[in-house]
Image (tube, helix red, strand yellow):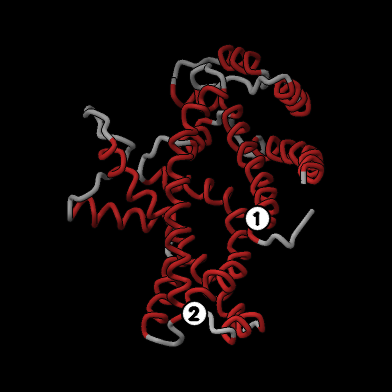
Amino acid sequence: MGVYVARRVIVSLPVLLGLSMLVFTILQLPPGGPVDFYASQSSRLSDADRRAIEQLFGLDRPRPVQYLRWLTAVLQGNWGRSYQDGRRVTTVIGERLPPSLQLAAASLLIAVFAAIPLGIFAASRGGGFCRYAIDIASILGISMPSFWLGLVGILVFSRWLGLLPTGGMYTFGARRTLLDGLQHLAMPAVVASAYWVAAWSRYVRGSLLEVIRQDFVRTARAKGLSEAVVLRRHTLRNALMPLVTLVGLRLPSLLSGVIVVEIVFSWPGVGLLLYHSMLSRDYPVLMGCLMGVAALVITGNLVADVLYTIVDPRIRY
């Protein structure tokens, strides 16, 4: 296993290098740049000031030279400084990473612990009314955009009912307590997990229905085992294999998917930072955020492969 993981990590390095070149090129294709953003903020910015800012940030050099300078600095552990406040990119992202991880972890827990029971319930109910209700709810959950669902949640639970805050991580000016943090986390986490609950419950249901028809399940029932034992020891363990793959592969999507949720609920995470950096053309921060997502995609694929061996001991690398 250790050799396999090491080989996957080595193979991932050229992939990250190619992605960094692609992302760096795409970010600079649209017209405008950081200097234009500064000019829009101040009407007193002269042409000499613009040239001075370009020289300060190295934007006056050809793009291949700019990329090589960035790559050399990154290999030395320096991800650059933000164009907005001059702080290190690692410091800026590091401040926003814990809230994003908190929101993503809460969304993942809700998605997994809600999708599995719903999938089991839908598979065990056959063609009853409850199964059709779950199917309809799943289709609605997959179809509804997260930003629209977030706005509806704010309207219903914050504006009409007054049960939950409209946004932020804590109540401004109040003492930070666990209850206050959970109240602010509840609605963004549920909105971010709605799509995954709907999608994964359908995968669990389909996988269970496929495993139930297998010969070893019929053999277990013929031995006199109860349905609960058959489900726990035989059916569910094999049916969770597709879900393990989905969770491992969708971890990056789950983290990147909270970007829209963070914007809607003003959650101070990496998603909101990425949005503001895109508006201000803060290239160093953008590169740091996007390369972090790319590394997370590769890590998610590796985690999914490793989790295979835990769920199914027959698999060895």
User: What is the C-alpha distance between the residues marked 1 and 2?
Assistant: 25 Å
Q: Position of residue 296 (x, y in %)?
A: 63, 42
Furthest residue in direction left, as rendered: 161
Q: Position of residue 178 (x, y in %)?
A: 29, 37
Residue drawn where x is 26% and y is 33% of the image: 177
Query: Badge 1 is on which residue?
Result: 310
Three-letter code, disc 2: Ser
Residue drawn where x is 53% and y is 80% of the image: 225
Asked which secondary structure carries label 2, the reply is loop
Asked which secondary structure carries label 1, the reply is helix
Q: Nearer the viewer, residue 213 or 291?
A: 213
Taking the image as shown, residue 126 lies to the left or right of residue 180, namely right
Taking the image as shown, residue 65 lies to the left or right of residue 131, namely right
- CA neighbours of label 1 inside 10 A, class few (<14), some (14 to 19), many (20+): few
Q: Nearer the viewer, residue 54 or 254?
A: 254
Furthest residue in direction front, as rendered: 223
Question: Counting residues from the N terminus, which is met first, the one under dot 1 or under dot 2?
Answer: 2
| Residue 50 image-quadrant placement | top right
* Nearer mark to the viewer, of 1 and 2: 2
Q: Nearer the viewer, residue 91 or 284?
A: 91
Query: Badge 2 is on which residue?
Result: 226
Q: Does 313 appear above or below 126?
A: above
Taking the image as shown, residue 33 lies to the left or right of residue 260, namely right
Q: Position of residue 83 (x, y in %)?
A: 55, 21
- CA neighbours of label 2 inside 10 A, class few (<14), some (14 to 19), many (20+): few
Q: Does 192 appear above or below 203?
A: above
Residue drawn where x is 45% and y is 77% of the image: 122
